[in-house]
Image (cartoon, rainbow, N blue to C red):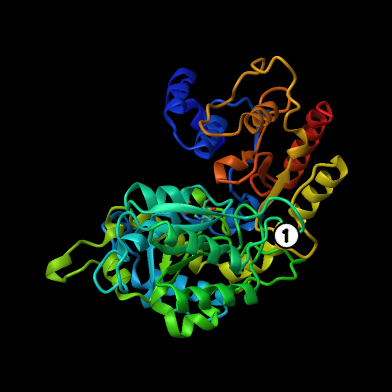
């Protein structure tokens, strides 16, 4: 029995439908729907997942060799990761970033979502920088953006995410510039608010681009010199590079600004995307800021005495064991992670080309120029199908409820997700996209042939709307 079959057996359809009704995030609700309620024919391309390496080598080289959980790994462990694990991850990230990363600056926790929240709490502490972050402060984020930033920064730290809308039309559509950020910053300041954090996702989800070094240098130099903002660079997709990409990935830790302002520049990464281990919930903070260190390891300052924050969302002993095995495994005498991250861009690029070919053949538009990187997404432009819903407007069932989505975009989502097409995409509105009609397709959520088959089904359905 496969895991999916096993999971489906765990819930009766009625119980699963009850759980589904209570899920507040659209992407997570879709994932749940596909796992527990969708017929075998339905395909979920909405979720940012990656099956490529598991099937190619990871299952054989790592997981099939894990027989038993050793006794030390059933016990409490350092919640921000053991020294050995932090050292191994620092080495892995040092290779990806192109600059040595000190294990002392690397802290584990349960997912990048948690890593982001930990940094926010860290920056609220004494010595984080002047002034420290406080509830109500604002977080500027170029939009569209991964909607989880709202969970990480708003729900418990009580910061406020402010989208910096990218243009959705014209020759510069979806291009980030320093001007856009400066304008947003100044407008918020003028309105009496405090933008104190800028978050950049590089490579970008959902746009699938690497930011070029010059742009990053400009943005970081401006933010460090003219504002008191901190920057978090979310580099969770840093190994997800196409071999045709002409703009190389640039980590924040290699920028000029990092030499003078390392205390205000923080990076996050995890095994969810590049290694496809989303369910393990692994996240890492890379930061030199002493207040962030104290929040990750615990604070003995009498005024701010706390337990390590990852205690509540730990890099626990089970993760330490399994990820430790992954980091120590070998393939033909080479470290497995080195082998896997050399192999991965080829696998990713093969899937990308296959799916791009299918989209081109079907005439389905997407925002992408040759030479751009693509992380694991196509940003589909389905604007031409907006307003094509046949009358009566209420004649179509809804797969999921979604408040705040443009009704035409939502209709198009349901049209593709329900029978006979049964392909789920993520509506751009979920990711704060400023205009309706764009959808994220994750081309690594399934093997390429299955994604291609799904694209053909979409093409048939969209053809009927023309
Ligand atoms: C940019 C970005 N950051 C963070 C995450 C969440 O990572 P995790 O599942 O490790 O919490 C995602 C997941 O889609 C993401 O796209």
Residue drawn at point x = 69 percent, y = 39 percent: 437
Q: Is residue 280 among the parts visible in the rendering? A: no
Q: Position of residue 72 (x, y in %)?
A: 30, 60
Residue nearer the viewer, 319 or 349: 349
Instruction: Give above or below for 360 relative to 337.
Output: above
Q: In this view, does 415 lie to the left or right of 86?
A: right
- Counting the numbered discs, the total is 1
Q: Position of residue 253 (x, y in %)?
A: 51, 77
Residue drawn at point x = 26 percent, y = 58 percent: 76
Name the quarter where the C terminus is drawn.
Answer: top right
Residue drawn at point x = 56 percent, y = 75 percent: 97
Q: In this view, does 401 lie to the left or right of 315?
A: right
Q: Where is residue 287 in the image (x, y as percent from the top left)?
A: 40, 72
Q: In which quarter of the image is residue 440?
A: top right
Q: In this view, does 45 lie to the left or right of 459?
A: left
Q: Is residue 409 among the parts visible in the rendering? A: yes
Q: What SS does tag 1 mark?
A: loop
Q: Position of residue 377 (x, y in %)?
A: 67, 51
Name the residue carrying label 1: 172
Name the quarter where the N terminus is drawn.
Answer: top right
Residue nearer the viewer, 171 or 362: 171
């Amino acid at each position: 029995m496969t895991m999916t079959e096993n999971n489906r057996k765990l819930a009766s359809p009625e119980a699963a439908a009850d759980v589904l009704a209570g899920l507040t995030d659209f992407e997570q609700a879709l994932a749940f729907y596909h796992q527990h309620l969708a017929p075998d024919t339905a395909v979920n391309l909405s979720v940012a997942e990656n099956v490529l390496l598991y099937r190619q080598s990871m299952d054989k080289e790592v997981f099939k060799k894990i027989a038993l959980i050793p006794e030390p790994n059933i016990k409490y462990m350092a919640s921000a990761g053991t020294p050995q694990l932090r050292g191994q991850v620092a080495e892995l990230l040092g290779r990806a970033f192109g600059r040595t990363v000190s294990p002392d600056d690397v802290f584990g926790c349960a997912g990048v979502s948690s890593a982001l929240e930990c940094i926010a709490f860290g920056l609220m502490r004494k010595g984080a920088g002047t002034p420290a972050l406080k509830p109500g402060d604002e977080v500027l984020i170029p939009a569209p953006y991964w909607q989880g930033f709202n969970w990480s920064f708003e729900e418990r730290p009580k910061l406020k995410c402010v989208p910096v809308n990218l243009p959705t039309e014209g020759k510069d559509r979806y291009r980030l510039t320093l001007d856009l950020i400066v304008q947003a910053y100044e407008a918020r300041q003028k309105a009496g608010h405090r933008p104190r954090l800028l978050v950049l996702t590089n490579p970008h989800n959902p746009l699938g681009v690497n930011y070029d070094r010059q742009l990053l240098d400009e943005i970081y130099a401006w933010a460090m010199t003219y504002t008191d903002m901190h920057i978090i660079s979310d580099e969770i997709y840093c190994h997800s590079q196409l071999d045709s990409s002409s703009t190389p990935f640039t980590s924040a830790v290699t920028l000029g600004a990092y030499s003078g302002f390392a205390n205000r520049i923080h990076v996050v990464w995890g095994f969810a995307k590049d290694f496809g281990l989303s369910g393990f919930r692994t996240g890492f903070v890379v930061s030199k800021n002493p207040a962030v260190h104290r929040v990750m390891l615990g604070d003995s300052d009498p005024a701010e005495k706390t337990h390590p924050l990852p205690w509540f969302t730990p890099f626990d002993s089970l993760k330490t064991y399994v990820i430790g095995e992954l980091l120590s495994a070998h393939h033909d005498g080479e470290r497995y992670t080195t082998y896997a991250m050399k192999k991965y861009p080829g696998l990713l690029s093969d899937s990308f080309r296959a799916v791009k070919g299918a989209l081109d053949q079907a005439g389905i538009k997407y925002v992408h120029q040759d030479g751009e990187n693509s992380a694991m997404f196509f940003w589909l432009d389905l604007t031409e199908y907006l307003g094509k819903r046949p009358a009566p407007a209420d004649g179509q069932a809804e797969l999921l409820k979604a408040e705040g989505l443009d009704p035409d975009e939502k209709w198009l989502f349901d049209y593709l997700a329900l029978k006979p097409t049964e392909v789920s995409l993520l509506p751009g509105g979920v990711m704060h996209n400023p205009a309706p009609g764009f959808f994220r397709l994750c081309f690594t959520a399934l093997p390429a042939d299955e994604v291609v088959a799904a694209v053909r089904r979409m093409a048939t359905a969209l053809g009927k709307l023309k």
